[in-house]
Amino acid sequence: MCGFVGFIDETKKKEKKEIIKQMAKRIIHRGPDGEGFYVDDKVALGHRRLSIVDLSGGAQPMYNEDKSLVIVFNGEIYNYEQLKDDLQKKGHIFESDCDTEVIIHGYEEWGIAELLQKLVGMFSFVIYDKKENQLCGARDHFGIKPFYYYKNKNAFFFGSEIKSFLEHPNFQKEVNKKALKMYLIFQYSVHEETFFKNVFKLKPGHYFIWRDNELEIKQYFEVKYHKKDNSKEQITKELSEILEQSVKYHQTTSDVEVGSYLSGGVDSSYVVSVAKPDKTFSVGFDEKGFDESMYAKELSEILGINNYRKTITPEEFFDALPLVEYYTDEPEANLSAVPLYYLSKLASEQVKVVLSGEGSDEMFGGYNEYYEPTLLKIYTRIPLCIRKFIRFLIKPLPHFPGQNTLRLYGLPFDERYIGHGTLMEEWEANEILCNELKSNETIRDTLKPVLDKIKTRDTLTKKMYIDMHFWLPQDILLKADKMTMANSLELRVPLLDINVFNYASSIPTKYLVEKKETKSIFRKIANNKIPEEWSKRRKLGFPVPFSKWIREEKYYKKVKEMFNQKFVKEFFDQAVIEQMLEEHYHNQKNNGRKIYNIYSFLTWYKVYFLDEKNV
Protein backbone atom coordinates (compact mmCIF):
# COMPACT_ATOMS: atom_id res chain seq x y z
CA MET A 1 0.00 0.00 0.00
CA CYS A 2 1.43 3.29 -1.06
CA GLY A 3 0.82 6.62 -2.71
CA PHE A 4 2.10 8.10 -5.94
CA VAL A 5 2.35 11.42 -7.74
CA GLY A 6 3.44 12.48 -11.20
CA PHE A 7 3.21 15.10 -13.89
CA ILE A 8 3.98 16.01 -17.47
CA ASP A 9 4.66 19.64 -18.27
CA GLU A 10 7.27 21.99 -19.72
CA THR A 11 9.29 22.33 -16.51
CA LYS A 12 13.00 21.67 -16.99
CA LYS A 13 14.36 18.33 -15.79
CA LYS A 14 16.38 19.83 -12.93
CA GLU A 15 13.33 21.67 -11.60
CA LYS A 16 11.16 18.58 -12.05
CA LYS A 17 13.32 16.66 -9.57
CA GLU A 18 12.76 19.10 -6.75
CA ILE A 19 9.06 19.55 -7.50
CA ILE A 20 8.29 15.82 -7.58
CA LYS A 21 10.09 15.32 -4.26
CA GLN A 22 7.96 17.99 -2.62
CA MET A 23 4.79 16.53 -4.13
CA ALA A 24 5.65 13.09 -2.77
CA LYS A 25 6.56 14.54 0.63
CA ARG A 26 3.06 15.98 0.91
CA ILE A 27 1.66 12.41 0.99
CA ILE A 28 4.35 10.85 3.18
CA HIS A 29 1.58 9.49 5.42
CA ARG A 30 0.65 7.07 2.62
CA GLY A 31 4.13 5.59 2.62
CA PRO A 32 6.57 6.39 5.43
CA ASP A 33 8.79 3.35 4.73
CA GLY A 34 10.48 4.62 1.57
CA GLU A 35 10.46 6.89 -1.44
CA GLY A 36 11.51 6.69 -5.08
CA PHE A 37 11.54 8.91 -8.16
CA TYR A 38 11.86 8.82 -11.93
CA VAL A 39 12.49 12.02 -13.87
CA ASP A 40 13.34 12.73 -17.51
CA ASP A 41 12.80 15.67 -19.84
CA LYS A 42 9.13 14.79 -20.23
CA VAL A 43 7.82 12.92 -17.18
CA ALA A 44 8.26 13.04 -13.41
CA LEU A 45 7.06 10.17 -11.20
CA GLY A 46 7.20 9.94 -7.41
CA HIS A 47 6.28 7.20 -4.97
CA ARG A 48 5.87 6.73 -1.22
CA ARG A 49 5.95 3.15 0.08
CA LEU A 50 4.25 1.38 2.95
CA SER A 51 5.99 -2.01 2.92
CA ILE A 52 3.53 -4.91 3.10
CA VAL A 53 4.67 -7.55 0.58
CA ASP A 54 8.32 -8.36 -0.26
CA LEU A 55 9.67 -6.02 2.40
CA SER A 56 13.26 -6.06 1.14
CA GLY A 57 12.32 -5.67 -2.54
CA GLY A 58 9.47 -3.97 -4.32
CA ALA A 59 10.84 -0.42 -4.37
CA GLN A 60 9.16 1.93 -6.81
CA PRO A 61 9.18 3.34 -9.44
CA MET A 62 9.72 -0.13 -10.93
CA TYR A 63 10.88 -1.12 -14.41
CA ASN A 64 10.66 -3.97 -16.89
CA GLU A 65 13.79 -5.78 -18.14
CA ASP A 66 14.94 -3.14 -20.64
CA LYS A 67 13.64 -0.19 -18.58
CA SER A 68 11.34 0.91 -21.39
CA LEU A 69 8.40 0.78 -18.97
CA VAL A 70 8.16 2.55 -15.61
CA ILE A 71 5.34 2.06 -13.09
CA VAL A 72 4.06 3.66 -9.90
CA PHE A 73 1.37 1.64 -8.17
CA ASN A 74 -0.91 1.84 -5.13
CA GLY A 75 -2.83 -1.20 -3.91
CA GLU A 76 -2.67 -4.96 -3.67
CA ILE A 77 -3.16 -7.64 -6.34
CA TYR A 78 -4.36 -10.78 -4.60
CA ASN A 79 -3.91 -13.16 -7.54
CA TYR A 80 -0.44 -11.90 -8.42
CA GLU A 81 1.26 -15.24 -7.75
CA GLN A 82 -0.90 -17.02 -10.33
CA LEU A 83 -0.31 -14.24 -12.87
CA LYS A 84 3.41 -14.31 -12.16
CA ASP A 85 3.57 -18.06 -12.88
CA ASP A 86 1.80 -17.50 -16.18
CA LEU A 87 4.12 -14.65 -17.17
CA GLN A 88 7.25 -16.59 -16.23
CA LYS A 89 6.12 -19.42 -18.49
CA LYS A 90 5.90 -16.85 -21.27
CA GLY A 91 9.54 -15.86 -20.68
CA HIS A 92 9.28 -12.81 -18.42
CA ILE A 93 12.08 -12.38 -15.90
CA PHE A 94 11.23 -11.12 -12.42
CA GLU A 95 13.58 -9.46 -9.97
CA SER A 96 11.19 -9.31 -7.00
CA ASP A 97 8.31 -11.16 -5.40
CA CYS A 98 5.87 -8.26 -5.39
CA ASP A 99 2.63 -7.59 -7.23
CA THR A 100 3.86 -4.33 -8.79
CA GLU A 101 6.20 -6.20 -11.10
CA VAL A 102 3.36 -8.48 -12.19
CA ILE A 103 1.41 -5.44 -13.43
CA ILE A 104 4.26 -4.08 -15.50
CA HIS A 105 5.06 -7.46 -17.11
CA GLY A 106 1.35 -8.07 -17.58
CA TYR A 107 1.07 -4.77 -19.45
CA GLU A 108 4.04 -5.77 -21.57
CA GLU A 109 2.49 -9.15 -22.41
CA TRP A 110 -1.21 -8.37 -22.77
CA GLY A 111 -1.62 -4.61 -23.06
CA ILE A 112 -3.61 -2.45 -20.65
CA ALA A 113 -7.15 -3.56 -21.60
CA GLU A 114 -6.54 -7.31 -21.35
CA LEU A 115 -4.39 -6.95 -18.23
CA LEU A 116 -7.20 -5.23 -16.35
CA GLN A 117 -9.53 -8.17 -17.02
CA LYS A 118 -7.09 -10.44 -15.18
CA LEU A 119 -6.41 -8.42 -12.02
CA VAL A 120 -8.09 -9.31 -8.72
CA GLY A 121 -7.50 -6.66 -6.09
CA MET A 122 -7.57 -2.98 -5.27
CA PHE A 123 -5.37 -0.70 -7.33
CA SER A 124 -4.56 2.52 -9.04
CA PHE A 125 -1.42 2.84 -11.13
CA VAL A 126 0.34 4.70 -13.92
CA ILE A 127 2.73 3.19 -16.46
CA TYR A 128 5.09 5.34 -18.52
CA ASP A 129 5.65 3.60 -21.85
CA LYS A 130 8.77 5.14 -23.39
CA LYS A 131 8.55 3.21 -26.67
CA GLU A 132 4.97 4.31 -27.31
CA ASN A 133 5.65 7.74 -25.80
CA GLN A 134 2.53 7.55 -23.67
CA LEU A 135 1.21 7.27 -20.14
CA CYS A 136 -1.54 4.85 -19.23
CA GLY A 137 -3.16 4.13 -15.92
CA ALA A 138 -6.19 2.63 -14.24
CA ARG A 139 -8.37 2.49 -11.15
CA ASP A 140 -9.82 -0.72 -9.70
CA HIS A 141 -13.30 -2.06 -10.42
CA PHE A 142 -15.09 -0.46 -7.46
CA GLY A 143 -12.92 2.55 -6.60
CA ILE A 144 -11.27 1.15 -3.48
CA LYS A 145 -8.13 3.12 -4.27
CA PRO A 146 -8.30 6.80 -5.29
CA PHE A 147 -6.99 8.39 -8.48
CA TYR A 148 -7.04 12.12 -9.26
CA TYR A 149 -5.81 14.09 -12.24
CA TYR A 150 -5.46 17.73 -13.20
CA LYS A 151 -5.15 18.98 -16.73
CA ASN A 152 -4.83 22.24 -18.59
CA LYS A 153 -3.37 23.23 -21.97
CA ASN A 154 0.22 22.55 -21.02
CA ALA A 155 0.19 20.07 -18.14
CA PHE A 156 -1.16 16.80 -16.81
CA PHE A 157 -0.84 15.97 -13.10
CA PHE A 158 -1.96 12.75 -11.42
CA GLY A 159 -1.78 11.16 -8.01
CA SER A 160 -3.34 9.38 -5.05
CA GLU A 161 -4.30 12.61 -3.29
CA ILE A 162 -5.17 16.09 -4.56
CA LYS A 163 -3.06 17.79 -1.89
CA SER A 164 0.13 16.67 -3.64
CA PHE A 165 -0.75 18.98 -6.57
CA LEU A 166 -0.50 21.99 -4.27
CA GLU A 167 3.30 21.60 -4.30
CA HIS A 168 3.55 22.20 -8.05
CA PRO A 169 4.13 25.90 -8.87
CA ASN A 170 1.90 25.67 -11.95
CA PHE A 171 -1.11 24.28 -10.13
CA GLN A 172 -3.91 26.83 -9.89
CA LYS A 173 -5.79 26.27 -6.65
CA GLU A 174 -9.38 27.40 -7.07
CA VAL A 175 -12.57 26.21 -5.39
CA ASN A 176 -15.21 24.67 -7.63
CA LYS A 177 -18.34 26.31 -6.22
CA LYS A 178 -20.61 24.45 -8.65
CA ALA A 179 -20.00 21.26 -6.68
CA LEU A 180 -21.58 22.64 -3.51
CA LYS A 181 -25.30 22.20 -4.22
CA MET A 182 -25.13 18.48 -4.91
CA TYR A 183 -22.73 18.02 -1.99
CA LEU A 184 -25.37 19.48 0.33
CA ILE A 185 -27.91 16.98 -0.98
CA PHE A 186 -25.69 13.88 -1.15
CA GLN A 187 -23.30 14.81 1.74
CA TYR A 188 -20.24 14.09 -0.43
CA SER A 189 -18.71 15.26 -3.71
CA VAL A 190 -20.64 13.53 -6.51
CA HIS A 191 -19.30 15.10 -9.68
CA GLU A 192 -16.37 13.84 -11.73
CA GLU A 193 -14.80 17.28 -11.32
CA THR A 194 -13.82 17.72 -7.68
CA PHE A 195 -14.13 20.73 -5.37
CA PHE A 196 -10.85 21.91 -6.92
CA LYS A 197 -11.37 23.37 -10.39
CA ASN A 198 -9.92 21.25 -13.19
CA VAL A 199 -9.11 18.37 -10.83
CA PHE A 200 -11.02 15.20 -11.71
CA LYS A 201 -11.53 11.70 -10.35
CA LEU A 202 -10.79 8.78 -12.60
CA LYS A 203 -13.97 6.73 -12.31
CA PRO A 204 -13.87 3.18 -10.89
CA GLY A 205 -13.51 0.54 -13.57
CA HIS A 206 -11.84 2.96 -16.00
CA TYR A 207 -8.40 3.41 -17.51
CA PHE A 208 -6.76 6.22 -19.46
CA ILE A 209 -4.13 6.82 -22.11
CA TRP A 210 -2.31 10.17 -22.29
CA ARG A 211 -0.54 10.72 -25.59
CA ASP A 212 0.38 13.82 -27.62
CA ASN A 213 -1.18 16.04 -24.94
CA GLU A 214 -4.54 14.28 -25.34
CA LEU A 215 -6.38 12.30 -22.67
CA GLU A 216 -8.48 9.29 -23.66
CA ILE A 217 -10.54 7.53 -20.97
CA LYS A 218 -12.12 4.10 -21.46
CA GLN A 219 -14.24 1.79 -19.31
CA TYR A 220 -13.06 -1.77 -18.69
CA PHE A 221 -15.60 -2.85 -16.05
CA GLU A 222 -19.29 -2.15 -15.61
CA VAL A 223 -21.61 -3.17 -12.78
CA LYS A 224 -24.13 -5.56 -14.31
CA TYR A 225 -26.70 -7.95 -12.88
CA HIS A 226 -27.39 -11.35 -14.42
CA LYS A 227 -29.83 -13.06 -12.09
CA LYS A 228 -29.87 -16.88 -12.00
CA ASP A 229 -32.76 -18.81 -10.53
CA ASN A 230 -30.64 -21.12 -8.37
CA SER A 231 -31.95 -22.55 -5.12
CA LYS A 232 -31.26 -20.78 -1.84
CA GLU A 233 -29.33 -23.83 -0.61
CA GLN A 234 -27.05 -23.85 -3.67
CA ILE A 235 -26.42 -20.11 -3.43
CA THR A 236 -25.63 -20.34 0.27
CA LYS A 237 -23.09 -23.12 -0.29
CA GLU A 238 -21.35 -21.56 -3.31
CA LEU A 239 -21.29 -18.02 -1.96
CA SER A 240 -19.93 -19.20 1.38
CA GLU A 241 -16.97 -20.82 -0.36
CA ILE A 242 -16.26 -17.71 -2.45
CA LEU A 243 -16.43 -15.41 0.57
CA GLU A 244 -14.08 -17.56 2.65
CA GLN A 245 -11.61 -17.75 -0.24
CA SER A 246 -11.66 -13.96 -0.58
CA VAL A 247 -11.02 -13.43 3.14
CA LYS A 248 -8.10 -15.88 2.91
CA TYR A 249 -6.61 -14.02 -0.09
CA HIS A 250 -6.90 -10.66 1.65
CA GLN A 251 -5.41 -11.95 4.88
CA THR A 252 -2.50 -14.03 3.60
CA THR A 253 -1.19 -11.72 0.86
CA SER A 254 1.04 -9.96 3.35
CA ASP A 255 4.46 -10.22 4.97
CA VAL A 256 3.28 -8.27 8.03
CA GLU A 257 0.62 -8.89 10.68
CA VAL A 258 -3.00 -8.36 9.63
CA GLY A 259 -5.61 -7.25 12.17
CA SER A 260 -9.28 -6.43 11.69
CA TYR A 261 -11.82 -3.74 12.47
CA LEU A 262 -14.77 -5.03 14.46
CA SER A 263 -18.10 -3.34 15.17
CA GLY A 264 -21.26 -4.96 16.47
CA GLY A 265 -22.58 -5.55 12.94
CA VAL A 266 -22.68 -8.70 10.85
CA ASP A 267 -20.14 -7.68 8.18
CA SER A 268 -17.00 -7.15 10.23
CA SER A 269 -18.10 -9.91 12.63
CA TYR A 270 -18.22 -12.39 9.75
CA VAL A 271 -14.81 -11.31 8.43
CA VAL A 272 -13.25 -11.68 11.88
CA SER A 273 -14.86 -15.10 12.40
CA VAL A 274 -13.28 -16.38 9.16
CA ALA A 275 -9.91 -14.64 9.41
CA LYS A 276 -9.46 -15.11 13.19
CA PRO A 277 -6.75 -12.45 13.46
CA ASP A 278 -4.84 -11.99 16.71
CA LYS A 279 -6.13 -8.43 17.14
CA THR A 280 -9.37 -6.56 16.53
CA PHE A 281 -10.05 -2.83 16.92
CA SER A 282 -13.19 -0.91 17.89
CA VAL A 283 -14.27 2.61 18.85
CA GLY A 284 -17.43 4.14 20.27
CA PHE A 285 -18.92 7.04 22.21
CA ASP A 286 -19.90 7.28 25.84
CA GLU A 287 -23.53 7.89 24.89
CA LYS A 288 -26.42 5.45 25.07
CA GLY A 289 -27.32 4.18 21.60
CA PHE A 290 -24.04 5.36 20.07
CA ASP A 291 -21.68 2.58 21.04
CA GLU A 292 -21.42 -0.93 19.60
CA SER A 293 -17.93 -1.57 20.91
CA MET A 294 -19.22 -3.73 23.76
CA TYR A 295 -20.53 -6.19 21.16
CA ALA A 296 -17.11 -6.23 19.50
CA LYS A 297 -15.49 -7.00 22.83
CA GLU A 298 -17.96 -9.82 23.50
CA LEU A 299 -17.42 -11.46 20.11
CA SER A 300 -13.63 -11.13 20.41
CA GLU A 301 -13.81 -12.93 23.77
CA ILE A 302 -15.96 -15.69 22.25
CA LEU A 303 -13.41 -16.15 19.44
CA GLY A 304 -10.39 -15.82 21.74
CA ILE A 305 -9.07 -12.65 20.10
CA ASN A 306 -7.54 -9.55 21.69
CA ASN A 307 -9.79 -6.52 21.25
CA TYR A 308 -8.46 -2.97 21.47
CA ARG A 309 -11.09 -0.28 22.15
CA LYS A 310 -11.24 3.49 22.37
CA THR A 311 -14.01 5.80 23.56
CA ILE A 312 -14.09 9.10 21.68
CA THR A 313 -15.01 12.29 23.55
CA PRO A 314 -16.83 15.28 22.02
CA GLU A 315 -13.64 17.33 22.37
CA GLU A 316 -11.65 14.74 20.43
CA PHE A 317 -14.30 14.67 17.72
CA PHE A 318 -14.21 18.43 17.13
CA ASP A 319 -10.41 18.58 17.44
CA ALA A 320 -9.97 15.97 14.71
CA LEU A 321 -12.39 17.45 12.19
CA PRO A 322 -9.90 19.85 10.49
CA LEU A 323 -7.45 16.95 10.13
CA VAL A 324 -10.16 14.72 8.69
CA GLU A 325 -11.14 17.37 6.14
CA TYR A 326 -7.48 17.85 5.23
CA TYR A 327 -6.87 14.15 4.64
CA THR A 328 -10.08 13.58 2.64
CA ASP A 329 -9.06 16.29 0.11
CA GLU A 330 -12.70 17.20 -0.52
CA PRO A 331 -15.48 18.08 1.96
CA GLU A 332 -16.64 14.95 3.77
CA ALA A 333 -19.88 15.18 5.75
CA ASN A 334 -20.20 11.55 6.78
CA LEU A 335 -20.01 11.71 10.56
CA SER A 336 -18.33 8.31 10.69
CA ALA A 337 -15.15 9.68 9.08
CA VAL A 338 -13.99 11.09 12.43
CA PRO A 339 -14.39 7.89 14.47
CA LEU A 340 -12.81 6.02 11.56
CA TYR A 341 -9.79 8.35 11.85
CA TYR A 342 -9.42 7.45 15.54
CA LEU A 343 -10.04 3.76 14.83
CA SER A 344 -7.25 3.81 12.24
CA LYS A 345 -4.94 5.59 14.64
CA LEU A 346 -5.65 2.95 17.29
CA ALA A 347 -5.00 0.07 14.87
CA SER A 348 -1.82 1.61 13.45
CA GLU A 349 -0.20 1.36 16.88
CA GLN A 350 -0.44 -2.44 16.62
CA VAL A 351 -0.52 -3.52 12.94
CA LYS A 352 0.13 -2.30 9.41
CA VAL A 353 -2.87 -3.96 7.74
CA VAL A 354 -6.52 -4.31 8.76
CA LEU A 355 -9.50 -6.11 7.26
CA SER A 356 -12.90 -4.41 7.16
CA GLY A 357 -16.45 -5.16 6.01
CA GLU A 358 -17.18 -2.48 3.40
CA GLY A 359 -19.16 -3.41 0.28
CA SER A 360 -21.43 -6.08 1.69
CA ASP A 361 -24.48 -3.82 2.05
CA GLU A 362 -24.38 -2.61 -1.55
CA MET A 363 -23.95 -6.12 -2.97
CA PHE A 364 -26.26 -8.11 -0.70
CA GLY A 365 -29.03 -5.59 0.07
CA GLY A 366 -28.02 -4.53 3.56
CA TYR A 367 -29.31 -1.01 4.09
CA ASN A 368 -32.52 -0.43 5.98
CA GLU A 369 -33.80 1.71 3.08
CA TYR A 370 -33.72 -1.37 0.85
CA TYR A 371 -36.72 -2.81 2.67
CA GLU A 372 -40.09 -1.36 1.66
CA PRO A 373 -43.17 -2.43 3.69
CA THR A 374 -46.17 -3.78 1.79
CA LEU A 375 -48.26 -0.67 2.48
CA LEU A 376 -45.53 1.51 1.01
CA LYS A 377 -45.35 -0.65 -2.11
CA ILE A 378 -49.11 -0.30 -2.50
CA TYR A 379 -48.83 3.47 -2.05
CA THR A 380 -46.27 3.75 -4.87
CA ARG A 381 -48.83 2.21 -7.24
CA ILE A 382 -51.02 5.29 -6.80
CA PRO A 383 -50.47 7.60 -9.81
CA LEU A 384 -47.56 9.98 -9.24
CA CYS A 385 -49.70 13.06 -9.85
CA ILE A 386 -51.91 12.13 -6.88
CA ARG A 387 -48.92 11.41 -4.64
CA LYS A 388 -47.45 14.77 -5.63
CA PHE A 389 -50.70 16.49 -4.68
CA ILE A 390 -50.69 14.76 -1.27
CA ARG A 391 -47.08 15.87 -0.83
CA PHE A 392 -48.13 19.47 -1.57
CA LEU A 393 -51.05 19.33 0.88
CA ILE A 394 -49.05 18.03 3.85
CA LYS A 395 -46.00 20.26 3.41
CA PRO A 396 -47.28 23.16 5.60
CA LEU A 397 -48.85 20.91 8.25
CA PRO A 398 -47.29 20.38 11.71
CA HIS A 399 -45.19 17.23 11.89
CA PHE A 400 -47.08 13.95 12.26
CA PRO A 401 -45.97 10.27 12.09
CA GLY A 402 -45.40 9.22 8.48
CA GLN A 403 -45.25 12.78 7.14
CA ASN A 404 -41.66 12.48 5.92
CA THR A 405 -42.45 9.19 4.17
CA LEU A 406 -45.47 10.68 2.37
CA ARG A 407 -43.36 13.67 1.29
CA LEU A 408 -40.57 11.44 0.05
CA TYR A 409 -42.84 9.07 -1.86
CA GLY A 410 -44.56 12.02 -3.49
CA LEU A 411 -41.47 12.16 -5.71
CA PRO A 412 -40.56 9.97 -8.70
CA PHE A 413 -37.94 7.29 -8.00
CA ASP A 414 -35.08 9.23 -9.62
CA GLU A 415 -35.64 12.08 -7.16
CA ARG A 416 -36.79 9.99 -4.21
CA TYR A 417 -33.78 7.69 -3.92
CA ILE A 418 -30.39 9.24 -4.53
CA GLY A 419 -28.46 6.82 -2.38
CA HIS A 420 -28.04 5.80 1.19
CA GLY A 421 -26.69 9.14 2.40
CA THR A 422 -29.43 11.57 1.31
CA LEU A 423 -29.50 14.71 3.46
CA MET A 424 -31.84 17.27 1.90
CA GLU A 425 -33.97 18.08 -1.12
CA GLU A 426 -33.10 20.46 -3.97
CA TRP A 427 -35.21 23.34 -2.64
CA GLU A 428 -33.61 23.03 0.79
CA ALA A 429 -30.12 23.26 -0.70
CA ASN A 430 -31.09 26.35 -2.72
CA GLU A 431 -32.65 27.90 0.36
CA ILE A 432 -29.39 27.89 2.33
CA LEU A 433 -27.05 28.81 -0.55
CA CYS A 434 -26.17 32.41 -1.30
CA ASN A 435 -27.90 33.95 -4.33
CA GLU A 436 -24.89 33.43 -6.60
CA LEU A 437 -24.89 29.66 -6.04
CA LYS A 438 -28.62 28.93 -6.23
CA SER A 439 -29.18 26.91 -9.38
CA ASN A 440 -31.58 24.79 -11.39
CA GLU A 441 -29.26 21.79 -11.22
CA THR A 442 -31.31 18.75 -10.27
CA ILE A 443 -30.76 15.37 -8.70
CA ARG A 444 -32.11 13.90 -11.93
CA ASP A 445 -29.24 15.55 -13.84
CA THR A 446 -26.76 13.73 -11.63
CA LEU A 447 -28.45 10.34 -11.59
CA LYS A 448 -29.62 10.16 -15.22
CA PRO A 449 -26.46 8.66 -16.80
CA VAL A 450 -26.55 5.86 -14.23
CA LEU A 451 -30.30 5.23 -14.07
CA ASP A 452 -30.64 5.18 -17.86
CA LYS A 453 -28.69 1.89 -17.80
CA ILE A 454 -31.07 0.18 -15.40
CA LYS A 455 -34.54 1.56 -16.20
CA THR A 456 -36.35 -1.78 -16.39
CA ARG A 457 -34.98 -3.31 -13.18
CA ASP A 458 -36.85 -3.78 -9.91
CA THR A 459 -36.65 -1.11 -7.19
CA LEU A 460 -34.17 -2.98 -4.99
CA THR A 461 -31.74 -3.52 -7.86
CA LYS A 462 -31.99 0.15 -8.81
CA LYS A 463 -31.17 1.20 -5.25
CA MET A 464 -28.14 -1.09 -5.04
CA TYR A 465 -26.98 0.06 -8.48
CA ILE A 466 -27.13 3.73 -7.45
CA ASP A 467 -25.22 3.02 -4.24
CA MET A 468 -22.58 1.04 -6.12
CA HIS A 469 -21.93 4.11 -8.29
CA PHE A 470 -22.27 6.93 -5.76
CA TRP A 471 -22.39 6.16 -2.03
CA LEU A 472 -19.87 3.29 -2.09
CA PRO A 473 -16.97 4.77 -4.11
CA GLN A 474 -17.47 8.45 -3.33
CA ASP A 475 -18.14 8.21 0.39
CA ILE A 476 -17.63 4.81 2.01
CA LEU A 477 -14.46 3.75 0.18
CA LEU A 478 -13.03 7.27 0.00
CA LYS A 479 -13.11 7.84 3.76
CA ALA A 480 -11.91 4.28 4.39
CA ASP A 481 -8.84 4.85 2.23
CA LYS A 482 -8.11 8.39 3.39
CA MET A 483 -8.55 7.79 7.14
CA THR A 484 -6.43 4.64 7.19
CA MET A 485 -3.72 6.13 4.99
CA ALA A 486 -3.69 9.25 7.19
CA ASN A 487 -2.35 6.88 9.83
CA SER A 488 -0.07 4.88 7.49
CA LEU A 489 -2.36 1.87 7.68
CA GLU A 490 -3.53 -0.39 4.86
CA LEU A 491 -7.21 -1.32 4.79
CA ARG A 492 -8.48 -4.35 2.87
CA VAL A 493 -12.11 -5.12 2.04
CA PRO A 494 -12.48 -8.87 1.37
CA LEU A 495 -16.26 -8.69 0.93
CA LEU A 496 -15.80 -6.21 -1.93
CA ASP A 497 -13.90 -8.47 -4.32
CA ILE A 498 -14.48 -8.86 -8.03
CA ASN A 499 -15.05 -12.62 -7.67
CA VAL A 500 -17.52 -12.03 -4.84
CA PHE A 501 -19.37 -9.41 -6.87
CA ASN A 502 -19.54 -11.58 -9.97
CA TYR A 503 -21.40 -14.17 -7.93
CA ALA A 504 -23.46 -11.72 -5.87
CA SER A 505 -24.75 -10.05 -9.04
CA SER A 506 -26.43 -13.34 -10.03
CA ILE A 507 -28.42 -13.77 -6.80
CA PRO A 508 -32.20 -13.21 -7.18
CA THR A 509 -33.39 -10.18 -5.20
CA LYS A 510 -35.93 -12.36 -3.35
CA TYR A 511 -33.00 -13.84 -1.40
CA LEU A 512 -31.42 -10.48 -0.60
CA VAL A 513 -34.33 -8.86 1.27
CA GLU A 514 -36.80 -11.40 2.68
CA LYS A 515 -39.82 -10.25 4.65
CA LYS A 516 -38.34 -7.58 6.94
CA GLU A 517 -34.78 -8.94 6.90
CA THR A 518 -32.16 -7.10 4.85
CA LYS A 519 -29.08 -8.91 3.54
CA SER A 520 -30.85 -12.21 4.19
CA ILE A 521 -28.59 -14.59 2.25
CA PHE A 522 -25.43 -13.08 3.73
CA ARG A 523 -26.86 -13.27 7.26
CA LYS A 524 -27.65 -16.94 6.70
CA ILE A 525 -24.03 -17.60 5.74
CA ALA A 526 -22.72 -15.54 8.66
CA ASN A 527 -24.95 -17.42 11.08
CA ASN A 528 -22.82 -20.52 10.45
CA LYS A 529 -19.79 -18.63 11.77
CA ILE A 530 -21.05 -16.28 14.47
CA PRO A 531 -23.83 -16.30 17.10
CA GLU A 532 -27.30 -15.38 15.85
CA GLU A 533 -27.26 -12.24 18.02
CA TRP A 534 -24.60 -10.83 15.69
CA SER A 535 -25.82 -12.28 12.38
CA LYS A 536 -29.36 -10.93 12.90
CA ARG A 537 -28.49 -7.52 14.36
CA ARG A 538 -30.16 -4.65 12.52
CA LYS A 539 -27.94 -2.32 10.51
CA LEU A 540 -26.81 0.54 12.74
CA GLY A 541 -23.94 2.07 10.79
CA PHE A 542 -21.52 4.22 12.75
CA PRO A 543 -23.75 6.59 14.74
CA VAL A 544 -22.26 9.79 16.16
CA PRO A 545 -24.09 11.96 18.75
CA PHE A 546 -23.27 15.26 16.99
CA SER A 547 -26.92 16.39 16.97
CA LYS A 548 -27.05 15.88 20.72
CA TRP A 549 -23.73 17.65 21.36
CA ILE A 550 -24.70 20.87 19.58
CA ARG A 551 -27.66 21.27 21.89
CA GLU A 552 -25.02 21.82 24.58
CA GLU A 553 -23.90 25.44 24.89
CA LYS A 554 -20.19 24.69 24.41
CA TYR A 555 -20.55 23.00 21.03
CA TYR A 556 -23.45 25.14 19.89
CA LYS A 557 -21.17 28.18 20.33
CA LYS A 558 -18.38 26.43 18.41
CA VAL A 559 -20.61 25.89 15.40
CA LYS A 560 -22.15 29.35 15.69
CA GLU A 561 -18.70 30.94 15.68
CA MET A 562 -17.96 29.21 12.38
CA PHE A 563 -21.32 30.19 10.86
CA ASN A 564 -20.69 33.85 11.80
CA GLN A 565 -17.34 34.16 10.02
CA LYS A 566 -17.16 36.62 7.12
CA PHE A 567 -16.13 34.14 4.44
CA VAL A 568 -19.31 32.10 4.97
CA LYS A 569 -21.45 34.58 3.00
CA GLU A 570 -19.43 33.64 -0.09
CA PHE A 571 -21.31 30.32 -0.03
CA PHE A 572 -24.37 30.52 2.21
CA ASP A 573 -27.21 32.75 3.27
CA GLN A 574 -25.92 33.30 6.79
CA ALA A 575 -29.28 34.31 8.19
CA VAL A 576 -30.84 31.03 7.03
CA ILE A 577 -28.11 28.73 8.37
CA GLU A 578 -27.97 30.62 11.67
CA GLN A 579 -31.73 30.20 12.03
CA MET A 580 -31.30 26.49 11.28
CA LEU A 581 -28.79 26.28 14.12
CA GLU A 582 -31.03 28.20 16.53
CA GLU A 583 -34.01 25.95 15.79
CA HIS A 584 -31.91 22.91 16.52
CA TYR A 585 -30.32 24.33 19.67
CA HIS A 586 -33.73 25.21 21.11
CA ASN A 587 -35.07 21.75 20.23
CA GLN A 588 -37.63 23.09 17.74
CA LYS A 589 -36.33 20.97 14.85
CA ASN A 590 -33.72 18.26 14.36
CA ASN A 591 -31.33 19.93 11.90
CA GLY A 592 -28.22 18.20 13.22
CA ARG A 593 -27.13 16.37 10.07
CA LYS A 594 -27.73 19.38 7.83
CA ILE A 595 -25.76 21.59 10.23
CA TYR A 596 -22.88 19.11 10.19
CA ASN A 597 -22.96 19.07 6.41
CA ILE A 598 -22.48 22.85 6.30
CA TYR A 599 -19.97 22.86 9.16
CA SER A 600 -17.85 20.19 7.45
CA PHE A 601 -17.70 22.12 4.19
CA LEU A 602 -16.72 25.35 5.98
CA THR A 603 -14.03 23.49 7.93
CA TRP A 604 -12.66 22.05 4.69
CA TYR A 605 -12.65 25.43 2.96
CA LYS A 606 -10.94 27.06 5.92
CA VAL A 607 -8.24 24.37 5.96
CA TYR A 608 -7.46 24.53 2.24
CA PHE A 609 -8.12 28.16 1.33
CA LEU A 610 -7.75 30.31 4.47
CA ASP A 611 -5.28 28.57 6.78
CA GLU A 612 -2.37 28.70 4.34
CA LYS A 613 0.15 27.56 6.95
CA ASN A 614 -1.60 24.18 7.05
CA VAL A 615 -1.65 23.54 3.32
Image (spheres, grey):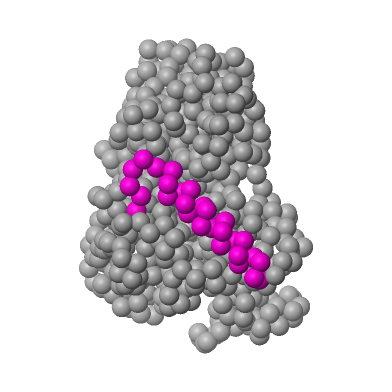
Compare residues 164 and 108 and report the one nearer the observer.
108
The structure residue drawn at horizontal position 58% and vertical position 45%, both measured from the top left corner, is 141
Q: Is residue 93 above or below residue 495?
A: above
Is 239 included in the stretch rendered in magenta? yes
Compare residues 72 and 320 and report the one nearer the observer.
72
Residue 580 sits in quarter: bottom left
Count of numbered marks? 0
Residue 123 showing in the rendered view: no
The structure residue drawn at horizontal position 38% and vertical position 59%, both measured from the top left corner, is 276
Is 593 included in the stretch rendered in magenta? no
Chief SS of the magenta region: helix
Q: Is residue 313 above or below residue 144?
A: below
- The region drawn magenta spans 232-259
Answer with left or right where residue 18 lies relative to residue 539. Answer: left
Q: Position of residue 559 (x, y in %)?
A: 30, 62
Compare residues 546 and 245 and report the one nearer the observer.
245
The structure residue drawn at horizontal position 56% and vertical position 22%, both measured from the top left corner, is 92
Looking at the rendered image, the quarter that the C terminus falls into is: top left
